[in-house]
Image (spheres, coloured by chain):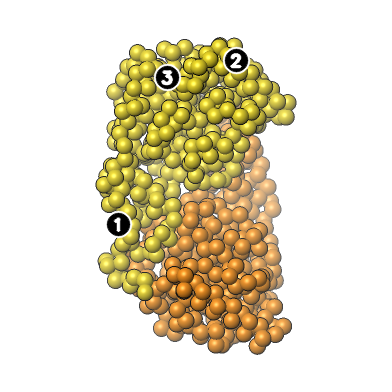
Chain colours: A orange, B yellow
Amino acid sequence: MAEQRTFASLDEIRALLRELPGPDLETGAAAAERQARLTKPAGSLGRLEDLAQWLATWQGRHPPQIERPYAAVFAGNHGVAARGVSAYPAAVTKQMVQNFIAGGAAVNQLCGLADADLRVYEMALEEPTRDFTEAPAMDEEACVRALAYGMMAVEQGIDVLALGEMGIGNTTSAAAICCALYGGPAADWVGRGTGVDDEGLVRKTAVVEQAVAMHRETLGEAMSDPFEVLRCLGGLEIAAIAGAVMAARLARTPVVLDGYTCTAAAAVLHAADPRALDHCLVAHRSAEPGHRHLLEKLQQEPLLDLGMRLGEASGAMLAVLLLKAACACHSGMATFDEAGVSGPG
Amino acid sequence: MAEQRTFASLDEIRALLRELPGPDLETGAAAAERQARLTKPAGSLGRLEDLAQWLATWQGRHPPQIERPYAAVFAGNHGVAARGVSAYPAAVTKQMVQNFIAGGAAVNQLCGLADADLRVYEMALEEPTRDFTEAPAMDEEACVRALAYGMMAVEQGIDVLALGEMGIGNTTSAAAICCALYGGPAADWVGRGTGVDDEGLVRKTAVVEQAVAMHRETLGEAMSDPFEVLRCLGGLEIAAIAGAVMAARLARTPVVLDGYTCTAAAAVLHAADPRALDHCLVAHRSAEPGHRHLLEKLQQEPLLDLGMRLGEASGAMLAVLLLKAACACHSGMATFDEAGVSGPG
């Protein structure tokens, strides 16, 4: 784990967000220049070329490399799970954490394939956040602590950070965050998550609608602040992901976001500062329908669209394979000159 | 290389196509049954679940495995290249073969990443096919020989075969094949390939239009036979790919098709028998616009859509990474029972 930062308030987090470093345009330009000389028609590797340049830009080095990919999966429990918004009981969060530790989950297999380190962060599973239909999910102290905990997960020297989550009830939290940040009917943001039936879907939609309305009424103007949205409607693992995204920027570590819940966590930062996610890409378009709307708001075009909706950084690790492919081509291919291949014309 | 088959005529190839084995429904069902017990909500790995089942079905074994992926890249030269249909001179085909052998091309890096064997098959580069605006590209003997050559490339024991090609001018050939198989204006099937300018695109479109019209007039009814289309408008590497697809089916080796030219080669078989490509998937949607139309005709939904248009099995090798991911999850994940994770409800 990295050094622990301490923050006294959300204001200190807001201040840190304003200080995040920008892109390294020099290393990005060096990558673009090399791409133009590699033995392929210009642009013919499509997004793999963009990825190599993006990695160079946000790693601040050329050539970019992914020798040490890293997956961080945060697990938290949600008071709102008691409202019957998930197809699974809340006990599954803990059981799945044990499955991650034992190596039996999807993300374990995918990390093995990508030769990535996997760390699972269990966040007080016996103490779920409060049911946000009744009260803010977290008080300020808990929210700040969760953000700081996520920051701690970003070690130095990670080449790319794949973020993921586990938490029964957390697509309800994601939907509520999106609904509060972007408006629109709750139904636009709510999906079946792990697979609730029609009745459960109606219940989940009503929960999101009521919760957002309730907090808007209670907080008034303050709900226009994205960190207040996070505090009222988020969860511990969601706050931790937002923290990890910030810490990765400070450490010059590009980030791969997983599915709906993970992207919703990052959206809190984007709503506070649209530049906050420039070092992030979204791995895949989740089958969860709210993700499509969210990606439009973030103007993010995901790399993959495989109908996945598992979470736990599973989609993010697939995207890491594509990033490795982009790096391998960028660094390993011969130039036209080296290979004695004729250019166009 | 596998044992060499000899064929006296295209009729013998047509006969072989009728004898291709069907799916192994038993191993496919075993895969579906296991998927339902793995520690994830049903269907939440999306297409990765379908891929595991598809691999089991066409490998004829459960669990499916990809320990030995294999890329076969066929290179050929095209008489029609003299018509100014490519941004690159025909000499580049040979130069790129040398680049493959030296390890400097994109596909070399991607095979390294996927731990795949790469074989490059150079097909008489000094003797291009005839310019198909003037005469059939191949006589029957040459076409049959190229098909048989492609069959030879399929060794026993390959877990998945990624097919690719290299050949200056071959997107013109691919467009002509598609136009002859499916009709419609030539402009629907022609794109910029390696990057021809506007003038080159007009020239390329006219070449395809004229060639298809000319062969239709000369051959009459016979042009409704897909193998005649291949002979008149194809190329050596394109015929070889069609042969390799057939041989892979006989060897119970699932196939990953690359981009436009590779898919057009396989489309010849599909036009002759719609079941012929059931053991194939298309890796990615090429940026070449004709590929989109072709995928609709084949009712294939590619795995990736990354704006690539390089050929040489580069997209296919990315898809192999996803197949490896599907196998890793399928074989390595714990079941609900094994992990002590509660099911829904």
Q: Determine which residue is flagged by label 3.
A: B146
Q: Counting residues from the N terminus, which is met first, the one under dot 1 or under dot 2?
A: 1
User: Picture coordinates of residue B114 (x, y %)?
Assistant: 42, 44
Residue drawn 57% across the image and 58% down it: A282
Q: Mark 3 against mark 2, which lies toward the viewer? A: 2
Q: Mark 3 against mark 1, which lies toward the viewer? A: 1
Asked if marks 3 and 2 touch (Cβ < 8 Å), the reply is no
Q: Element at badge 3?
A: helix
Residue at the front extreme of this rendering: B221
Q: Determine which residue is flagged by label 2.
A: B214
- Residue B314 in view, yes or no: no
In front of the other: B251 or B313 = B251
User: Picture coordinates of residue A5 (x, y %)?
Assistant: 56, 77
Q: CA distance from mark 3 to mark 2?
A: 24 Å
Q: Determine which residue is flagged by label 1.
A: B34
In front of the other: B246 or A28 = B246
Q: Mark 1 against mark 2, which lies toward the viewer? A: 2
Q: Counting residues from the N terminus, which is met first, the one under dot 3 or under dot 2?
A: 3
Residue drawn 51% across the image and 49% down it: A322
Host chain of mark 2:
B
Do the residues marked 1 and 2 share a common chain?
Answer: yes
In front of the other: B248 or B114 = B248
Host chain of mark 1:
B
Could you say which quadrant of the image residue B332 lies in? bottom left
The kind of residue on which mark 3 rests is Ala
Q: Element at badge 1?
A: helix
Is the residue A262 above or below the residue B160 in the image? Answer: below
Mark 1: give few (<14), some (14-19) or many (20+) Cα within 10 Å. Answer: some
